Each structure stands twice: as structure tokens, then as C-alpha cells.
């Protein structure tokens, strides 16, 4: 099982912060890795298009 989680946050690395789970605004589960990655890329692109994030600031090296 794979999960794509959307968080609200203003700092990295968020996973080091206690209580980061409270910042989850959405989560979607997938049985298939490729579906999860495709969904991630779609969400990332849509956030970049509306200016919520600067896509260059997102570490994407480990997600194909």
C-alpha cells in the first residue's frame, strides 16, 4: 500500500517535527506504486500552477 499525503507547513524537514501528523490536509491511498507516483506528480503540478509552491524547491530526485 502507498499513500500520498498533503501537508500544510512552512518548514523542512517536516518529518523531524513532533506533531507533523496534525498538519495533514489530505491523504490518498493506492495499491499500485505507479498510480501513487502519477497522482503525486499531478498534485505537484497543480499546486505549482496556482503558485502555492515553487516546484524548484521540492526535492523530487527520489520519485520517478
Image: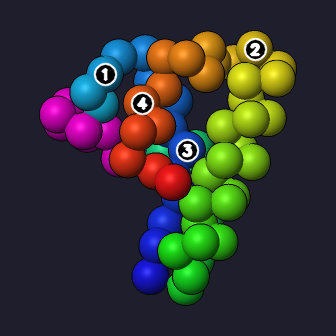
SS class, disc 4: loop
- Closer-to-camera residue (10/38): 38
Q: Earlier in the sequence, mark 2 or mark 1?
A: 1
- Closer-to-camera residue (13/37): 37
Q: Does the image show residue 60?
A: yes
Q: Are marks 3 and 4 in contact (CB under 8 Å)?
A: no
**Which residues lie in the magenta part?**
15-22
Label 2 sits on residue: 51
Q: Are marks 2 and 4 in contact (CB under 8 Å)?
A: no
Could you give the CA–CA distance between mark 3 and mark 2, rounded to whole angstroms? 16 Å
The label nearer to you, 4 versus 1, is 4
Q: Earlier in the sequence, mark 1 or mark 3?
A: 3
- Residue at 59% in and 72% down: 34
Task: Using a 10 Å C-alpha cutoff, classify the residue at mark 2 as few (fewer than 14 neighbours), some (14 to 19) or many (20 or more).
Answer: few
Task: Using a 10 Å C-alpha cutoff, classify the residue at mark 4 as few (fewer than 14 neighbours), some (14 to 19) or many (20 or more).
Answer: few
Q: Earlier in the sequence, mark 3 or mark 2?
A: 3
In this picture, is 11 found above or below 44? above
Could you give the CA–CA distance between mark 4 and mark 1, rounded to whole angstroms? 11 Å
Q: Earlier in the sequence, mark 2 or mark 4?
A: 2
Q: Position of residue 1 (x, y in %)?
A: 44, 82
Label 1 sits on residue: 12
SS class, disc 3: strand
Q: How is the image coloured?
A: rainbow
Could you give the CA–CA distance between mark 3 and mark 4, rounded to whole angstroms? 15 Å
Label 3 sits on residue: 6
Task: Using a 10 Å C-alpha cutoff, classify the residue at mark 3 as few (fewer than 14 neighbours), some (14 to 19) or many (20 or more).
Answer: some
Amino acid at each position: 500500500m502507498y499513500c500520498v499525503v498533503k501537508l500544510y507547513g512552512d518548514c523542512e524537514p517536516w518529518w523531524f517535527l513532533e506533531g507533523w501528523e496534525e498538519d495533514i490536509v489530505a491523504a490518498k491511498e493506492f495499491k499500485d506504486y505507479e498510480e501513487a507516483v502519477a497522482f503525486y506528480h499531478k498534485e505537484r503540478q497543480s499546486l505549482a500552477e496556482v503558485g502555492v509552491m515553487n516546484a524548484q524547491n521540492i526535492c523530487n530526485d527520489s520519485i520517478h
